[in-house]
Image (cartoon, rainbow, N blue to C red):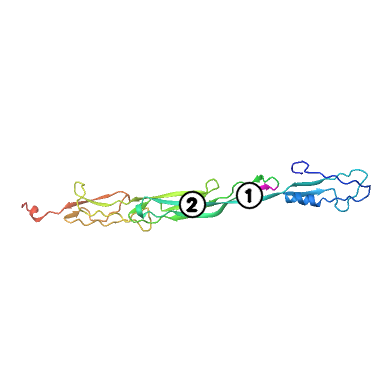
Amino acid sequence: DDTTGKTLSSADLEKGTVGSKINYTTADKIKSYEDNGYEFVSSNFTDGSQVYAKEGNDFVVHLKHSTKEVVSYKDATQTIHYVGAGDKTPADKVQTQKDAFTKTDTIDKVTGEVVKTTGWEGTKTFGTENTPVVQGYHADKKTAGGLTATPENPDVEETVTYSPNGKLVPVDPNGTPIPGADTPTYPTDPNDPTKVVPNEPIPDVPGYTPVDPSPVTPTNPGEDTPVPYTKNETPAAKYGLT
């Protein structure tokens, strides 16, 4: 065994006269070792024509351990979680790359041991996902994903968080919300889930007049915007009548 330097086995040859043919074959023994993971290297014995010499009738067949390569594969995934929009929350979006990473092990066919390995190799960068628009909520990211998976971290994740949109809140001159007045929620921008639609018309409040009737553009999509109104005077009140 050239791999270990050890003698695997030996066989005694029958006695014979100098110059006579040696009645022995190495073929069967070599085949048996090859069946068990060895590889033939060399031999100084010639089957079928070897003859006895006056001396030196010892022969050596050299073999070594054969090897094979075994390739393993590992998948990669990117998962985008969506949270915060109640029963309107979108389902997770998952991208999967089969066989994203490979590892090649060199196996000793005699012992079954791994004698060499490349370790896990490769990287995978996933594509991005547009964040779905959920009316009444705004997201913290317009797009998500584009993450890079590695053999050490094959399953990458990101979370998109939704928050409720603010409202237009009609208030009286003292800043107190007007009872019974509509408080419309800002609509989410259909082209950008992180924003709300600008220039929102203010609601009509019966018996009140807005201080400024101009449309409102919220400064923060998650905060309510107070809209001041003054109460309309009745004819009786106008002339001091009761």
Image: magenta residue range: 105-109
The image position of residue 27, as x and y in percent, is 81, 52
Q: Amino acid at mark 2?
A: Gln
Q: Amino acid at mark 1?
A: Thr
Q: Earlier in the sequence, mark 1 or mark 2?
A: 2
The image position of residue 235, as x and y in percent, is 9, 56
**Could you say whether the residue bearing mark 2 is in a helix, strand or loop?**
strand
- Badge number at residue 22: none
Q: Nearer the viewer, residue 144 or 197?
A: 144
Q: Do the numbered discs 1 and 2 sit on residues whose CB atoms are within 8 Å?
A: no
Q: Is residue 90 left or right of residue 65?
A: left
Identify residue for label 1: 104
- In the displayed orientation, state which residue is furthest to the left: 241
Q: Nearer the viewer, residue 122 or 47?
A: 47
**Could you say whether the residue bearing mark 1 is in a helix, strand or loop?**
strand
**In this rendering, is residue 111 above or below 216?**
above
Q: Nearer the viewer, residue 5 or 161?
A: 5
The residue depicted at 77 percent of the width and 50 percent of the height is 40
Q: Is residue 219 left or right of residue 146?
A: left
| Quadrant of the frame with the N terminus | top right
The residue depicted at 77 percent of the width and 52 percent of the height is 31
Q: Is residue 98 left or right of residue 181?
A: right
Callout 2 environment at 10 Å: few (<14), some (14 to 19), or many (20+)? Answer: many
The residue depicted at 49 percent of the width and 55 percent of the height is 95
The image position of residue 88, as x and y in percent, is 36, 55
- In the displayed orientation, state which residue is furthest to the front: 14
Q: How many marks?
A: 2
Identify residue for label 2: 78
Tell me, yes or no, whether the highlighted magenta stretch contains residue 16: no
The image position of residue 242, as x and y in percent, is 5, 52
- Main SS, magenta region, reads strand
CA gap, disc 1 to disc 2?
24 Å
